[in-house]
Amino acid sequence: MWDNVRIFVKVARFGSFTTASTALHLSAATLARKVDALEAELGFTLFLRDNSGVVLTEVGQKFLQLIEPTSDEMHQVLNKAALLKGLDKTTLVRVSGTEPVIAEILAPNISGLFKSSPEARIDLAVENSPVNLSRFEAEIALRLAKPEGESLRVQRLATFEMGVWANRDLEVDLDRVRFAGYDLAYGRIAERAWLEQLDLAGSRFIQTASTRAILNIVCSGAAIGVLPSFISRKYPRLVKVHGLPKVPPRHLWMLMHPEVARMRSVREVADWIISVFRSGKT
């Protein structure tokens, strides 16, 4: 029942089985079955459902008010039980990271994980928004901002040089050229603050959460853009733009919940991630 209650709270918060299924990594049909089972056990209807999503019934609202204050404590208990079960068995390890870290660094080096841990199971999740490690939304998070005030195991993995890059055929006039850069999906990271400080995030600013999109915009010659140098150097058509203050470097942090970090499967994946960055294969 407790797991079904957890799912009910998540669906109620998102207002949709589909959206909640993405957060919980379960199918919408599975969530619907679990809510059906909870309703049958409670003896009343929690949601009114249609094609646009779900709406809490009056009794569903009252039940949510009753159970929500204790839901975080319930998550902690269930997570600790899962830890006891999974300390010595191979479990799926979800690594949540930004697009360039997952696609450009970890994915090309994935064979190294299976050489050292042939039975490893891994989910490389491309995400910009923070994940709640205490609720098992991921086992490992790779983030550009160091968290403060949280009881997490935090380790700096790398420092990336950033630069302003342009198509070599583009005549760059800094007074007229368009800029491409990150939106606020990553938070107010250093290069976003740099753009704002130089007043470059105005009407001529093209913003996106995708590094690949910025790269393609810059390659097309439509704009110049702030990009990690380790990616831009792979494209012969791109050159660094001079005449602007230096872009601040970007630090990458690995975050884990201390208890989750004790799991053998998580330790194996974390050790592999550390080895990739220490080897310089970025």
Image (cartoon, rainbow, N blue to C red):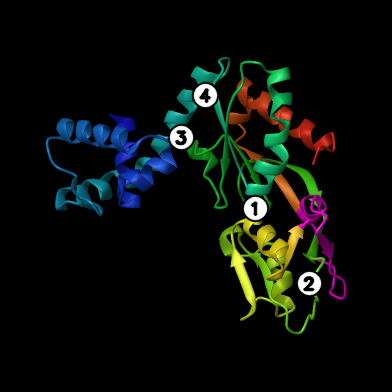
Q: Which residue is mark 4?
A: 83
Secondary structure under the numbered disc 1 in the rendered image? loop
Q: Are marks 2 and 3 in contact (CB under 8 Å)?
A: no
How far is disc 1 from disc 3 in space, using C-alphas?
Answer: 20 Å
Work out whether mark 1 precedes mark 3 in sequence or the reverse, and give the earlier one: 3
Q: Quadrant of residue 199?
A: bottom right
Quadrant, the N terminus: top left
Q: Nearer the viewer, mark 2 or mark 1?
A: 2
Q: Residue 148, labelled with which disc? A: 1
Residue placed at 79% from the left, 42% from the top? 282
Q: Residue 170, labelled with which disc? A: 2
- Amino acid type at circle 4 is Leu
- Amino acid type at circle 3 is Gln
Q: How many marks?
A: 4
- Can residue 269 be spotted in the picture? yes
Residue 78 vs residue 154: left or right? left
Residue placed at 16% from the left, 51% from the top? 57
Work out whether mark 1 precedes mark 4 in sequence or the reverse, and give the earlier one: 4
How far is disc 2 from disc 4 in space, using C-alphas?
Answer: 55 Å
Q: Badge 4, how many Cα within 10 Å: few under 14, some, many 20+?
A: some
The percent coordinates of residue 93 (x first, y second) are 57, 29
- Amino acid type at circle 1 is Glu
Q: Nearer the viewer, mark 2 or mark 3?
A: 2
- Magenta-colored span: 228-250
Residue 213 vs residue 26: left or right? right
Q: Which residue is mark 3?
A: 76
Residue placed at 61% from the left, 22% from the top? 265
How far is disc 2 from disc 1 in space, using C-alphas?
Answer: 42 Å
Main SS, magenta region, reads loop
